[in-house]
Image (tube, grey):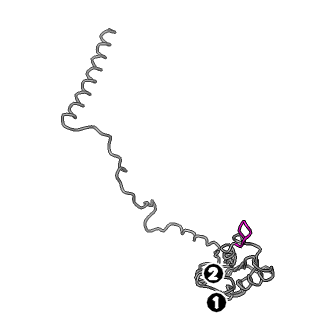
Amino acid sequence: MKMQYRAAMIALFGLGALSACQANNDNEDAGETQTAPESPLEGAQPTAPVSILRADIDGPPLPAAPVSSFELTVGFPDGGAELDDDALAALEQIANSEQIALGGPIVLGAHSDSDGSDSANERAAEARGLAVAGWLIERGVDEDRIDVIVFGEQNPAEPNALPDGSPNEEGRALNRRVEVLVVVPDADEADGSVESSN
């Protein structure tokens, strides 16, 4: 009985293997090669994201991108307090900035090189700061928004002298400058809704 069962199992296994081989041969005879089914994403072009929301319903509004403070340097490379073409171009950029329109404070850091006495350098730096402030006021900026801080030669952007002690003319030219900072007001201030502290 065991022998008959074993023989029957071997026969069934053999028939199964033969039928599988036959099916494979039939496909090869027909010129078909079996390949993995093509992925539905294969060769597809990227498309815009599809929302699962209804098309007639808008999503939540995106918050406005925060506006950061604006910084720019107005140079006076030739000395003095005259606004040259480069300085005027920088001032136009400042005047047309989104930050100026928001109405926040404007800080002007006025600098000089180290050639001359401390008091002379402070006067030169102050004259540069006032020249920038005057230009902004002429363009309609409220003078109460503007603070001029006179640094003189205290904070050089570049060394005023070379390592051998001789004057660094390029460095000195870069040190004669006004650094403009236009501060963005708080949202409450920008809306004019600052609460009274009564």
> Which quarter of the picture shows residue 178?
bottom right
> Which quarter of the picture shows residue 78?
bottom right
Quadrant assignment for the N terminus? top left
> Can you identify the residue that label 1 sits on?
140
Q: Is residue 22 above or below residue 50?
A: above
> Which quarter of the picture shows residue 149?
bottom right
Q: Position of residue 154 (x, y in %)?
A: 77, 74
Count how many numbered circles sit on residues in the image: 2
Residue at 64 percent across and 86 percent down: it is 83
Q: Label 1: state its secondary structure.
A: loop
Q: Nearer the viewer, residue 82 or 185?
A: 82
Secondary structure, magenta segment, majority class: loop
Q: Position of residue 74 (x, y in %)?
A: 64, 79
> Can you identify the residue that label 2 sits on?
100
Magenta span of residues: 160-167
* Kind of residue sitting beneath label 2: Ile
Q: Position of residue 26 (x, y in %)?
A: 20, 32
Classify 10 Å Cα crowding around label 1: few (below 14), some (14-19), many (20 and above).
few
Q: Nearer the viewer, residue 8 or 160?
A: 160
Q: Is residue 151 above or below residue 135?
A: above
Q: Is residue 98 above or below residue 44?
A: below
Residue at 72 percent across and 79 percent down: it is 110
Q: Label 2: state its secondary structure.
A: helix
Q: Nearer the viewer, residue 76 or 131?
A: 76
Earlier residue among tags 2 and 1: 2
Q: Is residue 45 above or below residue 174?
A: above
Classify 10 Å Cα crowding around label 2: few (below 14), some (14-19), many (20 and above).
some
* Kind of residue sitting beneath label 1: Gly
Q: Which disc, if any, is residue 174?
A: none
